[in-house]
Amino acid sequence: MITMTGAQQPFELCWDDKGLVHVFAGNKADAFRGMGYAAGYERLWQIHLSTLFATGTAASVMGPRYISQDLMHRSFNVPAFDMPDSPGDWVVDAYLDGLNSYVRGLADVPPEFIRAGTVPREFTRHDIASRHRFTGWFQHKTFMEKIYMGKLMARHGTQWFKNFVHNVSDADEKSILELKDALLSMDAGVGNLLFPKQSILSGSNNWAVRSHLSASGKPLLATDPHQPHSIPNTFFYVHLNAPDWDVFGASFPGIPYFMMGFNTDVSWGLTTGFIDTFDVFVEKEEAKTNKHFTIDVAGQEAASFEIAMSDRGPILESLSDELGLSTPKERQYTTSLNWVMKDIPTSAGALALMPLAENCKEFGDSLFENNICPLVNNIICVDKNNDLRRFIAATVQKRPGHKRPGGKPQGVTGTVPLAAWRPEYKFEISSAAELLVEHNPDCGYSLTANNDTMEDRGTFPIHNFPTYDARAERIRELLEEKIAEGDASTFNVSDFESMQQDVLDLRAMATVPAIASCLNDSSEQVQRARKLLETWDCKADVNSRAACIFYPLMDRRWHIKFMHEVLGDDLLLSMPVVAVSLNQFGVDDFFQKNSPWLEHRAKLEKILCDEVKHLVNNLDKEMGDQWAWGKLQHISFKHSLSKYEHWSTMHAGPDPISGSGTTLRMALHMPAVDDSEKVRAYHGPAFRWVVDLADPLHFRFVIAGGNSGRAESGHFTDQYQRWLSGEYYDVSLIRSELAIEKTVQVTGS
């Protein structure tokens, strides 16, 4: 029995045999109190750490290497400010009652806190509002892509690079010409302000069908959000029950809203939107104001900074100079960065009412407060009444450039830097109505997978730097194939599970023919590789031989070597790790009509042949004649403290894994760092679930690891093997059907 501040009635916390938490309460507020308590019990250090990041106080616990991150977050108002009241504040307060009751009840300092030399503290509305803002800030920072593209176009001309960027308009090209001198002098070293130091592409899959495409007669939704694999899992999974209300969802530990979830009326899924919420400006006037920041640092005196601020945002050179990342000097031009949310206050209760929605309209209303949403996501929502809606859950600058049907963007898109002195570049902000982008589409389904979900829709660009569309197009292809069979009403849960396990790579299908055509060297290694590629079914399964050529070859950055050899520009060499969204090249991208790269084709062919020779020799050395993708790509993940005894059992793998970053069974790896071709898949589905609204109290689900973050628990990796093998659990939300391992009774104080 535990006593909880604020609890209105006695309630029950249950842990089932899968490590999932169920809260059975007499009212919804107490259910959220139980959610907060359980999150603290399972994930307190994760909550504490995430809050340090969001509030710009990480250096106060973890030392000087986090000063630059804290200063960036503070300079751009990532920590919440001037928080307005919200209709969802009661949810936040109830959640905090439970979370802080756990903190106050601790008899001993948890071992993670001891290791870090700090102690737990209670949490506030400010922490939760800051976590929301941090989510929007962190997911897709585009400013280095814009700086790199601006500099490269200014140095060499727009014609060399515009085919590599999703949106480039005539107005963008004029901006490059206007700002040429400024862009040539712009310091790309401000890339050192990025945190983490290497940008990483994220991703997710999400789709839903309406009832006429479902065997059950009710809508179906599948979602699998992609995150770096870790212990504990990125998300915390919990079921809340109160009279006439059940909801299950995945939340970031420490905040009460369910990023993905469902109740008996509504189901929703989410993907990273690759939504462009940053604008880079060239400034030619000296900044009018300086702002002082003091960063507390563990083990040493606080660090003080004076940051120059323009009307648009902080001056990046001022930040890098103050941090010792660049050398202070007289500059004719500087660079300011505008983040759309920088001057827009947001509440703690934003998003908290999502799990209470009874239909898609209510759900959409819960995403925005006063037309503002702090996220940067695509969200698909479907309800039991067969209403399907897709939202851009974000706040976006309404830049005038957008794609016209059959044409190119008009007006500036924000893809390259802009002149600060032009008043027309003070953009209006989007409204909620403009971000309901799909409503009961004629096709009967909606999907997102980090692609350009807008295409010709809308009046302003949203996805300036989307990722490959291969996963999105594969979802569409699989849905359309079954619809075309004439028996479209037979989509069921197992169909969606099979789709989540699909390893056909449409990116490879589009890219391989052009690569193979360049492999014209007569050497045995090159011709063997060419034959493998030409006969490959483009499936990234563990036994594939051709995958051992394709994926390591794409990792070898032959496109950068080619561009560097032709242009001789050293800026290109750092682009793969600083401006990741600019590295989506295929052979055909270089050789489009009238492209200046065309006359250098022989150079590219030689580079590809040389890379393939080296690669084949490595593969022979490592695997003999037994090539298999699963021998190269392994998965493993562990607790960040697993080298210490207390956490030493908290690891999973290594194991072979199929898939790639562009298959629905997503397995993204980092390029090999030495001459070996072996790689670790570090990023993929944090969980997979499929929900049929015909029976939302039973669903199919599996976690990439487990739901616990406690070393003494049996549930931090208990689902790993089932997840790896593509299997799922049948999960029930009905109390009498649960296999309960532990129950905690809660009463009010």
Image (cartoon, grey):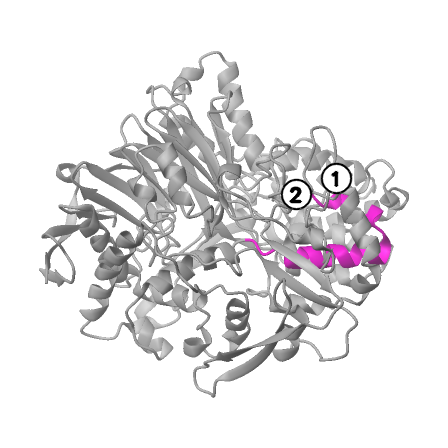
Left or right: 691 in relation to 346: left
Q: Residue 544: x and y, percent? A: 57, 38
Are there few (<14), some (14-19), or many (20+) residues within 10 Å of tag 2? many
Disc 1 marks a residue whose amino acid type is: Ile
Q: Is residue 165 magenta?
A: yes
Classify mark 1: helix, strand or loop. Answer: helix
Stretch of the chain drawn in magenta: 140-166
Compared with 647, 199 (above or below) is above
Residue 47 figure quarter: bottom left
The residue beneath circle 1 is: 515
Question: Residue 573 or 639: which is nearer the viewer?
Answer: 573
Q: Is residue 129 magenta?
A: no
- Sequence-first disc among 2 and 1: 1
Marks 2/1 in contact by CB < 8 Å: the verdict is yes
Compared with 125, 302 (above or below) is below
Q: Residue 579: x and y, percent? A: 66, 57
Q: Residue 221: x and y, percent? A: 39, 32
